[in-house]
Image (cartoon, rainbow, N blue to C red):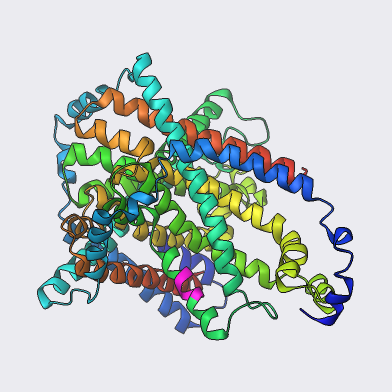
Amino acid sequence: MNSAQATVRGSAAELRDPAWKTRVTLALLALVLLWPLLVASEFRPWHLLDAQSLSASGRFLASFVPPALGAEFLALVAQAAWTTVAIATAGLALAWLGAVPLTLLGTARLSQSAVGRPMRPLPALGRQAIRWLLIFLRSVPELVWALLFVRVVGLGPTAGVLAIALTYCGMLGKVYSEVLESTDPAASDALLRNGSPRLGAFLYGALPQASTELVSYTIFRWECAVRSSVIMGFVGGGGLGQQMDMSMKMLAGGEVATMLLVFMLLVALADRASRLLRDTLA
Amino acid sequence: MNAPNATPEATLAVDTPPASRRRATLIVAALLALVAASFATLDLQLAAFLEPDAVGKMREFAGGFFPPEASPAFLAKLAWASLETLAMSALGTLIAMVVGLLLAILAARAPRTAGSALLRSGVRLLLNALRSIPELVWAALWVIAAGLGPFPGTLALAAHTVGVLGRLFADTLENLPAAPARALRDNGASESAVFLYATLPQATPQLMSYSLYRWENNIRAASILGVVGAGGLGQMLHFHLSLFQMREAASVIVAMLAIVAMVDALSHVARRRLTGS
């Protein structure tokens, strides 16, 4: 390469990596561990390259250009994009309606039985039950909720809305409680000790300190809900995802390309809107 | 979304100029209008849940899940699907680490690494595109190219994760201290030696921690990817739900929850161990 390197080239043995034995052993071990992974995930890249599938996916990919831009189709996509946003908004509104009472009941900070003494066993048990309910709601993935609701209410936006409502109710309830618990207890404690009802302690003690954080978390979740409502379309939850799934099954690449672009635009817009809202309101 | 309702009063009560208050009121009104418009246009069949026999129907539906199927033959299938899910997530993450690192080297604005400004922004754009398409959409696309099974699922996880990791890796490479690399380079080491013996050792802890975090995410994603036919537990769930075999579906859901709970617990322990608290 250059002269400095050339002068030391003479003693190649001294330049050898001192740690090469460990490196080679670790690399071999990694390969041995990799083998079962490749088997279990049926990793056969050459299937992508056999003539038949190559020509099929080649044709599909080639049909991506140009994206479908017919007026009728664009109207359909716009309709689907609105449905997606509406599913996210309605789902989150329902989730909010469920999460607020659960938060008010479940937050230990607002407990009247715990004022100046350890919480009584019955309220403690009730709070634990609410916590378990919230954990259950959010640990079943929204896609699974959507699959289940499609069996109950049929294909369409209702399943998507209910799935978002349940999962996000669990998420909002958990985070709302955590935010309220992390506020300074002085105000709500003083109110509760002087006989204020739970709602009063919440509105005048805990909420003023926490409102900014609660609002920005809710708006952030709305942004996530837009993304998941697209995904739920793939199992029949309505909106852009469902249209995309149909176009993919018909191998209509141009339509898929348009919808992918619209999806990226939608997510970017939701991102922008949520940042703007958080800056203004919070 | 009604939350902002209560907040403007709370946050803006003290010495707020009326203009920003009016703007906040407008925004809250717009949000309420959005919620109302959403409910109005969606044609939701929520009324069905208020009918007198709705409770009975729901109970019947929920009762169909009990008891979850637990015959040994079914459990063996379930165990294999769980293994498939784990393998998909591990392999997908591994591929993404390798490809992501290669792209990150091209995308990083480090002194004297390969690539011009144009190439760099091109690679950044590619990473953004890969990342902005969700795993499930990738899976639906790969199923078309590679057929049903865990292989397209692996590729889908890899495609999305390359976008995420490539971006994070590039940022890591850009933020490394420059001294060790310069010391090697000034002494005449080749560009690949500089990368292997200065850049990589410095970056490895950060790269590993990003990769582990993504693996955790990918296990969760892999368990549901299958609903579009991309292998693992998701495909099994989709299969049994399509046949209305609710007891089998219940077992699959329990297995999903168990895997996610296990990952959560492991990552909690690992994080505590690593941060030493």
Q: Name which quarter of the figure residue A118 lies in.
A: top right
Give coordinates of residue A46: x percent, y percent: 37, 51
Give coordinates of residue A225: x percent, y percent: 37, 57
Query: Does B244 sit above or below residue A234?
Result: above
Q: Determine whether, in the image, residue A63 is placed left or right of residue A166.
A: left
Q: Name which quarter of the figure residue B222 lies in.
A: top left
Which residue: 55% across, 68% down? B103
Residues shaded magenta: B123-127
Q: Determine whether, in the image, residue A188 is placed left or right of residue A58.
A: right
Q: Work out whether residue A201 can be spotted.
A: no
In front: B203, or B277? B203
Which residue: 39% across, 58% down? B134
Give coordinates of residue B219: x percent, y percent: 48, 43
Q: Determine whether, in the image, residue B118 is placed left or right of residue B244.
A: right
Query: Does A37 sit above or below residue A70?
Result: above
Give coordinates of residue A99: x percent, y percent: 41, 46
